[in-house]
Amino acid sequence: PEDDVHDGYYIPKGTIVIANLWYGVYQAVRVRSERFLGPNPEQDPFEIIFGFGLSAGRLLADASLYITMAMCLSAFDVSLAKDDA
């Protein structure tokens, strides 16, 4: 990494840049929501954030859901059904 200029703003090397995701997605949807309708709709900004193709927290959410379900299942004793006959 090295010094950079983005949209006229000088960003020195080593600077931590925190993006305002809420504002970017909110503005994209709020300003021209009709662009997502019709025969050739634009891609929904909720589907792509920073070009990753996934929302930033999706992988964490998937892992958290998996762990939560595993913990819930571990509380039960799973065995074959008993034959009362």
Image (cartoon, rainbow, N blue to C red):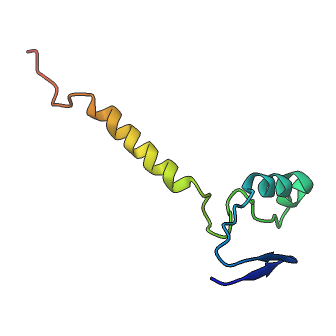
Residue 5 horizontal side relative to residue 15, left or right? right
Image height check: is 40 above or below 6? Answer: above
Residue located 85% across and 55% down the image = 27
Which sits in the foreground, 48 or 11? 11
Write the residue at 91% across / 55% down.
31
Residue that extends furthest to the bottom in the rendered view of this protein: 2
Q: Residue 10 in the image: state x and y as whole percent.
A: 81, 77
x and y percent of residue 59 in the render? 50, 56
Residue 36: give x, y in percent of width and height. Answer: 83, 58
Q: Quadrant of the N terminus?
A: bottom right
The quarter in which the C terminus is drawn is top left
Q: In the image, is 61 to the left or to the right of 19? A: left
Horizontal and vertical percent for residue 43?
75, 64
Snapshot quadrant of residue 44: bottom right
Q: Nearer the viewer, residue 3 or 26?
A: 3
Q: Residue farthest to the left?
A: 85
Q: How many marks do you count on the picture?
A: 0
Q: Name above or below for residue 48 compared with residue 11.
A: above
Q: Is residue 14 above or below residue 29?
A: below
**For residue 15, which quarter of the picture?**
bottom right
Q: What's the residue at 12%, 22% (across, down)?
A: 82
